[in-house]
């Protein structure tokens, strides 16, 4: 079965939106992979998941951790993401296509307001459409479907 893909466009803070959507998915019992653009972004997201809100910690580890298969949220930087321990829900914060994207049930693409991010997102959208995936787009700033 092909994955469903949701694009959240126009967010002023990609990490804040990711944290919010991951928290909601975690509360619903989803197993989550988060693909960051690079290790610097991964470190910022990791810190954010630890400190976002008291009493709302989201258990997470890096993909290379011995606990990755048992932890609900797994983080990786682009290039280190070839072997996810689960294939439920993937959040992509990188500007390229995730490796093995076809293995996931759902892909969430988080797109900021920068022109380069928008251009890369359009290319991913076109590739996903060519793959025959079900696509939906949302304006993250206004919280409406496009």
Image (tube, helix red, strand yellow):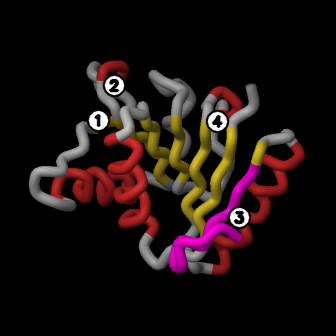
Of the numbered discs 3 and 4, the one sitting upstream in the chain is 4
At a point 69% along the width and 36% down the height, the residue shown is 3
Q: Which residues are magenta?
A: 135-146
Of the numbered discs 3 and 1, the one sitting upstream in the chain is 1
Q: Which residue is mark 3?
A: 120
At a point 74% along the width and 25% down the height, the residue shown is 1
Quadrant in the picture for residue 138: bottom right
Tag 2 secondary structure: helix
- On the image, the x and y values in percent for residue 10 come to 58, 76
- The answer to whether the residues at label 3 and label 1 have Cβ atoms under 8 Å apart is no
Q: Front-most of 120 and 73?
A: 73
Of the numbered discs 4 and 1, the one sitting upstream in the chain is 1
Using the numbered discs, state the Cα–Cα distance from disc 2 to disc 4 in whole angstroms.
18 Å
Tag 1 secondary structure: strand
Q: Which residue is mark 4?
A: 99
| Mark 1: few/some/many CA within 10 Å (<14, 14-19, 20+) | many
Tag 4 secondary structure: loop
Q: Which residue is mark 1?
A: 61
- On the image, the x and y values in percent for residue 142 come to 54, 79
Q: Is residue 122 above or below residue 100?
A: below
Using the numbered discs, state the Cα–Cα distance from disc 4 to disc 1 in whole angstroms.
19 Å
Q: Which residue is mark 2?
A: 68
- On the image, the x and y values in percent for residue 19 come to 35, 57
């Amino acid at each position: 079965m092909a994955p469903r893909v949701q694009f959240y466009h126009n967010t002023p803070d990609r990490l804040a939106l990711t944290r919010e959507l991951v928290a909601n998915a975690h509360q619903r019992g989803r197993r989550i992979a988060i693909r960051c653009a690079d290790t610097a972004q991964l470190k910022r997201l990791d810190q954010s998941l630890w400190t976002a809100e008291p009493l709302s910690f989201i258990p997470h580890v890096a993909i290379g951790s011995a606990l990755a298969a048992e932890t609900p949220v797994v983080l990786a930087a682009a290039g280190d993401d070839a072997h996810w321990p689960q294939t439920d829900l993937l959040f992509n914060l990188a500007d390229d296509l995730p490796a093995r994207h076809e293995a996931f049930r759902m892909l969430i693409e988080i797109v900021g307001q920068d022109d380069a991010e928008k251009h890369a997102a359009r290319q991913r959208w076109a590739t996903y459409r060519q793959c025959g995936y079900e696509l939906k787009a949302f304006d993250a700033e206004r919280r409406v479907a496009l």
